[in-house]
Image (cartoon, coloured by chain):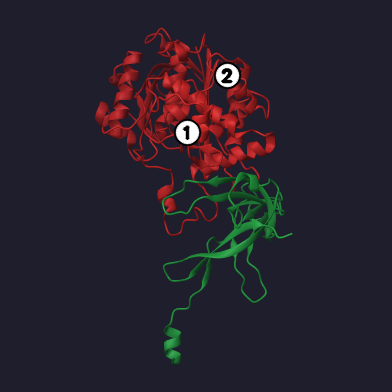
Amino acid sequence: MREVAVIGVGMVKFGRYDKSVWELARDAILEALQDAGVEFKKVEALYSGNMYRTNLSGQQILQQIGLTGIPVVNVVNACATGSTAVREAYLAVAMGLHDIVVAVGSEQMGKMGLLGADAARREESVEGILGSGLMPAIFSTAGVEHMRKYGTTIEQFAKVSVKNHKYGYYNPRSQYRVILSLEDVLNSRMISYPNTLYMCCPTGDGAAAVVLAPMSRAREFTSKPVKIAASVLTTDPYTDRVFALPDPNTMTRNAAKLAYEQAGIGPEDLDLVELHDCFATAEILHYENLGLCPEGEGGRLIDEGATEVDGRIPVNISGGLLSLGHPIGATGVSKICECVWQLRGEAQTPDRQVPDCKVALAHTIGLASGGACTIHILVR
Amino acid sequence: MTEAAKSAEPTKKARPIVPYLKLPEKEGEEAVLVGVRCKACGKAFLGERLVCPNCTAINQFEPVTFSRTGELYAYTIVYQSAPGIPVPYISAIIDLPEGVSVRANLVDIEPRPENLKFGMKVEMVTRKVREDSEGNDVIAFFFRPAVQ
């Protein structure tokens, strides 16, 4: 396997757009190509992640950016769609199939509201009868399970939202740039106990792209190549309650173990973690799943401020899904973009630049009836 | 009514909302959740399967009838759902003693966290939730705090 480098990154501000999703993807790719100093004619393959418009998504993007006839692989893997596209691109370069490749994630959700709500209205639906299979319920129940096991409090979960919105405020690419107090978060309307409105990520539109090349050629393009030290994909293995309560934990733990082995590092070596905070409850669970703190101490980690930008292990300094936004296909790629900017010292505003950032981890999961988890470890 | 008219009248039936809910077929029976247990690894599942999702053994199952009582493992209280679905409601994960967990609404209790104790005993009840397009009663299962 060859060493693989990220040589360019690009991302449109997450939000809501009148222009088409393919134009958003175009803009992200053009930024990434410019960042890499590569013209699109040099790109040998495109890996495209889009969840709601899966079929031929990459070809639609090529129509915006150049019909060069290159191979396109279209990827879908729930909320891990974009990061799965990055992994496919990584594998193609690592295995020597291609040299210069692009992975792009894009999504246009508009104001679609709760994911799965349309299906829940069908006559045969069991939503609201056999409990809830909607996203807030899945991650809220997982949070309540953590409360049961470790006594985690709703205030501790709410602090995640305060933190992530604070950094999102300083990130010009963030969808919701607003400073929230703990009271603001706790007093916003309850969506699914214990997650209030501000503890749930928004829907939105967005796109993000990366250009990858073998490390041996990276310096032809950039003075600041970032090495992909690990790229891992797992699914949810059998656990005893998995059919009743989808499990975000075990697949993340499995992925983390593999990623740390692949990179030859441990969680203590990380300078930044961008993890999948689709709901505030999820961030606390993943502190433990990724080994950032001992089992059961996720609540204490946020209380101590350890995951702030100047803390022991900064987490979601992009603003996270809660503030940056979560246009599904784009999310996993955007986390890798953020890691690259932080590793290069280009986090745009001093309030959210992680000091001396050398090793960063990007984590994304997709979970409904079944799950996917990716982890990428990036090193400068 | 003539015999011919009687037979032309559609017979309304009770229909379970999911295949793993078995409705009573005669007087004195109770509705139960049914499933299978893998003889190779011992794990139990709601409904029918060919292959064990835990150990991958093929067709090594024996039928199981699950208890109507269990314990509350975890829950959420849903305040925002799809349009048209009444809120709030408790979406509960119930552990049954045969080693399977099931998701269901927890009913007959005010949906407030202080009312919900982890491990509290709950029992299954069935209720009609709607009629299907053929006019059959659709029956669902729920759990409620167990009567001691």
Q: In this view, does A300 lie above or below A191?
A: above
Residue in the image at 36% along x and 38% along y: A109
- The residue identified by callout 2 is A263
Q: How far apart are marks 2 and 1 (CA)?
A: 35 Å
Residue A4, given in percent of the width and then of the height, sits at 47, 18
Q: The red chain is which one?
A: A
Using the rendered image of the protein, determine whether residue A318 is visible from the camera's viewpoint.
Answer: no
Residue in the image at 57% along x and 39% along y: A236
Res. B123 image quadrant: bottom right
Q: What residue type is labelled 2?
A: Ala
Residue A6 horizontal side relative to residue B60, left or right: left
Q: Circle 1 — which element?
A: helix
Circle 1 crowding by C-alpha within 10 Å: few under 14, some 14–19, many from 20: many
Using the rendered image of the protein, determine whether residue A193 is visible from the camera's viewpoint.
Answer: yes
- The residue identified by callout 1 is A198
In the rendered structure, the colour chosen for chain B is green
Residue in the image at 54% along x and 39% along y: A139
* View extreme (top): residue: A223
